[in-house]
Amino acid sequence: MPKNNFEHKNNNRQGDNKRKYYPRPQESAPRARASVKVKKPENFITLLLIIVIIASVIFMGVVFRTEIGIAIKNIGNNSTIDIDGGNNGANTVTLQPTLNEPFDFVVNETELEVHYLDVGQGDSIFIRLLKINKNILIDAGSGTGSGPKEVASNVTTFISGLGVTKINYFIASHADSDHINLADDILKKYEVENIYYNDIETAFDKDSTASKTVQDTLEDMSEAEPNATIIRLDPNGRTYEIINTSGYKFTIYSPGMNNFPDDNDMSNICVLEYLERRLIFTGDATKETEEWFIELQKASGNNSLDCDVLKVGHHGANTSSSQEFIDFLTPEYGVISVSVDNSYGHPHPLVMNRLFDKAIVTYRTNRHGNISLCIDSDANMAFIVDNPVPTDNNRLLINQLMIKRGDEAA
Ligand SMILES: [Zn+2]
């Protein structure tokens, strides 16, 4: 059964590639000739017809390629990058893959950016809904702890580098220090409009480190952002649809601390939809949270929830990313936020195997650095990374859609 599901998924993926990305004409031509050979037409007219069709397809492909302009805007530290230099000429971005042959793909002007920031041990994901000028920050990293020192301030350095001064929604997935320690820096530095958090004061021993961090953060929140709307997530669990406009939909699925008193279990699962793309963010959600989420979706009539990019739960720990969750979401790409040389053994080999079995192309902040996902108005995707090393788990040699940061104009 899982094998069949997988085969089906892979077929879909091939279809996606055909529709969205544009192989080089010189690669297409030999395949077309081979196709004529195999068919063995019985008469000359049939053969002529086939040749005319193939020639038309190749010609249309060339014309289409030259008409598409590529501009990736506001990525990383570059405010505007027009790949074709305004010439509207030959302007595809050529990948430099390490696992398969070069493959051109197209990204027009970006309308959605998701930056999975390298914060060492921890999570911080900055999202820009560019058409409506709204920014969302899920978690704020630890600012301290394991990982290279320079990543401690990476969140504010990166966000400021984009010229951003306002965060419309700050969402704390849960109260662990590697997700909220830097929250006070964020609140001091930027205008933050809305804050969503799990109030775990009653769930923790008041003297525990976690509880102290939460209390400190709460005090910082009201001090630093007296005008912000601070939303204490419903302790009994609730779904918050915070954005649904201009094609963007952002939903927080909060399991509630009364139902899930463990700090990781109570992690929110956030779903961002744009055009036909669906991105899922899990914080440190555990298998229990994942089960709750699946049941919630099924109760709404969703027997699966096709996901394009999954932020893999809890830094790749084996307490998350159950087989059932992976099967339910059928993600095509995964992103793991994880520190180099971490003492937790993240990501866990069993999780990596689960992703491998499904050929889920996996990016990791400890290898790729900051990972920026860009989506345009045609739902084309590209991953822009600091370090273009091979992705993990790409056993079917699926297009990585990878561009090195700074090389967008190559
Ligand atoms: Zn964590």
Image (cartoon, rainbow, N blue to C red):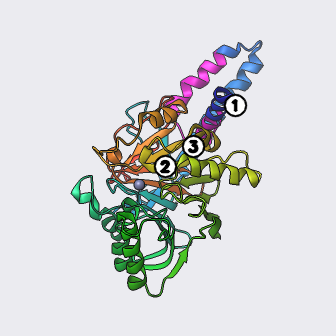
Question: Label 2 amino acid?
Answer: Gly
Q: Nearer the viewer, residue 339 or 407?
A: 339
Can you identify the residue that label 2 sits on? 313
Q: CA distance from mark 3 to mark 2?
A: 13 Å
Location of residue 356 with respect to 271 vertically, above or below: above
> Residue 359, how many percent across, how many down?
52, 33
Q: Nearer the viewer, residue 262 or 54?
A: 262
Between label 1 and label 2, give the one nearer the viewer: 2
Question: Label 3 amino acid?
Answer: Pro
Name which residue lies at 34% across and 44% down: 344
Earlier-in-chain disc, 3 versus 2? 2
Can you identify the residue that label 1 sits on? 53
> Residue 136, how many percent across, how many down?
49, 68
Q: Quadrant of ligand 1?
A: bottom left
Please say whether residue 12 is one of the residues in the magenta stretch: yes
Can you identify the residue that label 3 sits on? 331
Please say whether residue 332 is one of the residues in the magenta stretch: no
Dominant SS of magenta comes to helix
Question: Label 1 amino acid?
Answer: Ile
Tag 3 secondary structure: loop
Tag 1 secondary structure: helix
- Mark 2: give few (<14), some (14-19) or many (20+) Cα within 10 Å: many
Q: Which residues are magenta?
A: 11-37
Task: Find residue 234 and report its image quarter.
Answer: bottom right
Q: CA distance from mark 1 to mark 2?
A: 48 Å
- Residue 119 is left or right of residue 37, and the answer is left
Most extreme residue toward the bottom is 227
